[in-house]
Image (tube, rainbow, N blue to C red):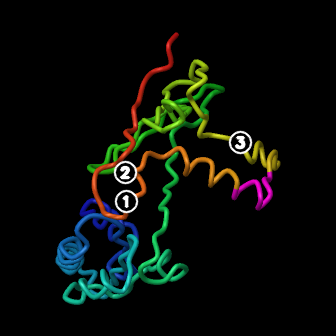
Amino acid sequence: VADGIRAAVAAAGPKLGAIRLDSGDLLSEARRARELLDSLGATSTRIVVTSDLDEHSIAGLAAAPVDGYGVGTSVATGSGVPTSGFVYKLVAREAGGRWQAVQKKSSGKTSRGGRKDAVRRRRDGVAVSEQVWLGGTPPPSADDRPLLEPVVREGSVVRSPSLAEAREHCARVLAELPPEAKKLSPGDPVIDTVYAEVPS
């Protein structure tokens, strides 16, 4: 964060409009950011925070030197409604006709680069793990259910399930979950995610 702030002020000057903080301890990060901005002469630069904010987390930031809040999910769903969070991370890029792995190395945000495939491992019809295969397509297994299905390929829609098909799929995959996955209390993941290289 500090390196990013220094680079932004160096590029835009002390009249830099705003910075955005999106992860970590936002209260501490905002205080450190304000001190650094002020020391660089960017005293009018605003601080905007995001990161799954709702009315409770915003209230908890009342003492922070924050000028604006970015709220997304909670605007659409309202308070107390569970949501699924998804993050897009680039994992490979094509260069010179070859695919190169790309991964984040930031603390707490590490990812595994390269092409992957994923299946849900089942035993007697009950999910036991999510298997992520690195480097290609996994060997077939009758107990595995593929988790990836193409819906757009090179800009063209290749599959567009109906609402009835989506409901049926949802009911089917929920039925695979073990009973402990249906508890509403927080805790460790019920199904482990296991990474493995595709056998050569």
Residue at label 3?
Answer: 150
Of pointers 3 and 2, the one earlier in the residue sequence: 3
Q: SS class of the residue under badge 2?
A: helix
Residue bearing the label numbered 2: 180
Q: Is residue 163 magenta?
A: yes
Q: Are marks 2 and 1 in contact (CB under 8 Å)?
A: yes
172 left or right, relative to 127:
right
Residue 45 covered by magenta stretch = no
Label 1 neighbour load within 10 Å: few <14, some 14-19, many 20+: few
Percent x, y for residue 189?
Answer: 34, 48
Q: Amino acid at mark 1?
A: Lys
**200 versus 177 height, above or below:** above
Dividing the image into 4 quarters, which one contains the N terminus? bottom left
**What is the span of residues highlighted in magenta in the rendered image?**
160-167
For the residues marked 3 and 1, what is the alpha-carbon distance in whole angstroms? 31 Å
Amino acid found under the numbered disc labelled 2: Glu
Amino acid type, mark 3: Pro
Question: To which residue does mark 1 refer?
Answer: 183
| Element type at mark 1 | loop
Q: Main secondary structure of the magenta part?
A: helix
